[in-house]
Image (cartoon, rainbow, N blue to C red):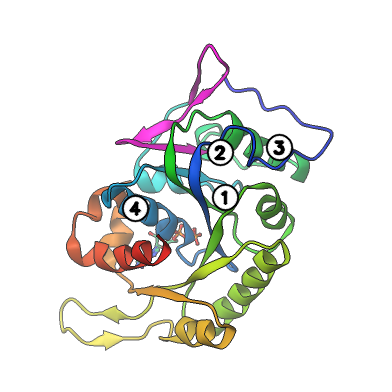
Amino acid sequence: AIEIVEHDRPPARLGQIGLRVKSVIAVGSGKGGVGKSTVAASLAQCLQRFGSKVGLMDADVYGPSVPHLLGLSGRPEVDENKRIIPIKKGPMPVMSMGFLVEPDQAVIWRGPMLHSSVTQFLRDTDWGLLDYLIIDMPPGTGDVALTLSQILPLSGAVIVCTPQEVALLDAVKAISMFGKVHIPILGMVENMSGFQCPDCNKHYDIFGKGGARDKAEELGTPFLGAVPINIPLRIAGDQGKLAECLDDDAIRAPMDQVARAVV
Ligand code: ADP
């Protein structure tokens, strides 16, 4: 079993402590529910399909949805060297707080405990040699998100938002938060960007369209791509088959575009 110890001092930056990875990419959002975890997990899968070695860390401690999206369960074992053996999706090592708490249990740990447990996960997990570690960050710009973006050895951040004005305003706050802690913004992704009716082929801009592209331009931030509302993608996420649904070229194409833009 994994024991989570509460440190009485802030954890050190992790760059030097044996995480063997070329690039650590945070996926953040201003608001919850915009598809941050879906984009993070899909980005990891697409980078792996390009031939890279990729790990996925679910640091969304208050709502760890990566295990559900990828259909993963079980408890990570600890080996004789006290290294945590991550749960794997195919070749991809995945770690999540969701593996440690029961699905219907709320995480009610205090801030310092959360920060130390996330850093412990990152430090003590046997990730192997990676090209990319994708980190699904907690949403928002509160204490947890801010401290994690300071602690984690991030190479850059991808910001996910929907085209709605409220989501964009919060995305701007998230961009400013990463800026404050000197994490480069790799760009913005517009998720839930329009809907093509499968029956009549008519296009509906349910949450609006193009808002993130315009905002990215205004901020001088790269625009990484738009992912439309897609019913099979939602169903696959609900059924734990997100990785499998990316076999569908039409679903994968917009995610591939984002992945190509971050490499
Ligand atoms: P967040 O991490 O921002 O809270 P999630 O990735 O958990 O968001 O997504 C929230 C819900 O929206 C999930 O049910 C997911 O399957 C669905 N979803 C995300 N992106 C899309 C999309 N492009 N089309 C349809 N459903 C989506």
Q: Disc 1, disc 2: CB below 8 Å?
A: yes
**Label 3 is placed on what type of residue?**
Ser
Q: Is residue 210 left or right of residue 106?
A: left
**Label 4 is placed on what type of residue?**
Leu
Q: Earlier in the sequence, mark 3 or mark 4?
A: 4
Q: Which numbered disc covers residue 116?
A: 3
Q: Earlier in the sequence, mark 1 or mark 2?
A: 1
Residue farthest right in this picture: 8
Marks 3 and 4, Cα distance to the nearest angstrom?
28 Å
**Label 1 is placed on what type of residue?**
Asp
Viewer-nearest of discs 3 and 1: 3
Viewer-nearest of discs 3 and 4: 4
Q: Which numbered disc covers residue 60?
A: 1
In the depicted structure, whether residue 255 falls above or below residue 205: above
Q: Secondary structure at mark 2?
A: helix
Marks 1 and 2, Cα distance to the nearest angstrom?
8 Å
In the depicted structure, whether residue 115 falls above or below residue 179: above
